[in-house]
Amino acid sequence: MTHPHGPPPDGDETVFLPPPGTPPHAPPPSPPGGRPPLGAVSVEPDAAPGAEPARRGRRAPRERRPRAPWPVRLVRGTLKLLLFLGACWALLVAAIHLFGRRDEARPSDAIVVLGAAQYDGRPSPVLQARLDHAIALYRRGVAPRMIMTGGTAPGDTVSEAEVGRRYAIRAGVPAGAILTERSGMTTLESIRAVAELMHQRGDSSAVLVSDPFHMLRLKLLARRAGLRGYSSPTRTSPISRNRAEERRFLVRESFGLPLAVLGAI
């Protein structure tokens, strides 16, 4: 029903007639209230000739910066690599230092003492500090036996292991409770020889005694050799009492540890 004037009665369909004189293709007039009729399509004005259609919701593409020459890229890459390696080295030094402060001593099959310098059958202050700590662990009942390590350096007449054995016997440790490994001249060689000796006896766990800076390397090498190693560093070494000397050994160990681990693979 068509209602040119006034609102339609309830229930009737509303049809709005265009006013007289309206072109036949013109859109129908809006109903009262300003809303377009249902199904009406809005017509936008024609764009100017040759103009591109407007895109809504998209930003104009950014201009790419020109690529730097390859020497510049090479220098930048080298600097980034050096920064990464420096950060890794700093973390390794911190790990060596922090691990050296841990004491994991617990009941085990043996106490392994890493060798150090000796002078004509007398242990050096560094070796003596390690031996004293190991003897104290033995007296506490941490393990039923001790294993001394260290071969014979050029010019010496006795091995580091034998010097350690004699020192422990004089301190009251029974000779039957001491084993020696006299072939190793490096930490890796000593740990491998100790692991073979312990495996032959059916042993698998050991408390490792050395200086604090040495403990992380020992722990990793013992695990690689099939031993359950527990670190127990000495606190009376002259290296630990001298801050400058301790830092020097920390730095040296930070380069020696990766090489030792790679050599054990």
Image (cartoon, grey):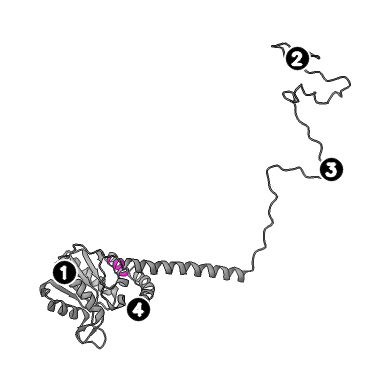
Tell me if 47 is positioned left or right of 259 in this view. right
Dominant secondary structure, magenta:
helix
Residue 76: % across, % down: 57, 68
Label 3 vs label 4, nearer the camera: 4
Question: Which corner quadrant of the image does residue 33 belong to?
Answer: top right
Residue beneath disc 3:
49
* Range covered by the magenta-colored residues: 217-222
- Find the distance from the CA under tag 4 to the CA under tag 2: 102 Å
Indicate which disc, 4 or 1, sits on the residue closer to the N terminus: 1
Q: Position of residue 77 (x, y in %)?
A: 55, 68
- What residue is drawn where x is 26% and y is 84%? 153
Q: Residues within 10 Å of mark 2 (few under 14, many from 20)?
A: few
Q: Which residue is located at x 67 percent, y 63 percent?
A: 66
Q: Secondary structure at mark 1?
A: helix
Q: What type is the residue that disc 2 sits on?
A: Pro
Please, what is the three-letter code of the amino acid marked with disc 4? Glu
Mark 4 or mark 2, earlier in chain: 2
The residue wearing badge 4 is 245
* Element class at badge 2: loop
What residue is disc 1 on? 138
Mark 3 vs mark 2, CA separation in Å: 44 Å
Picture coordinates of residue 113 (x, y %)?
A: 22, 73
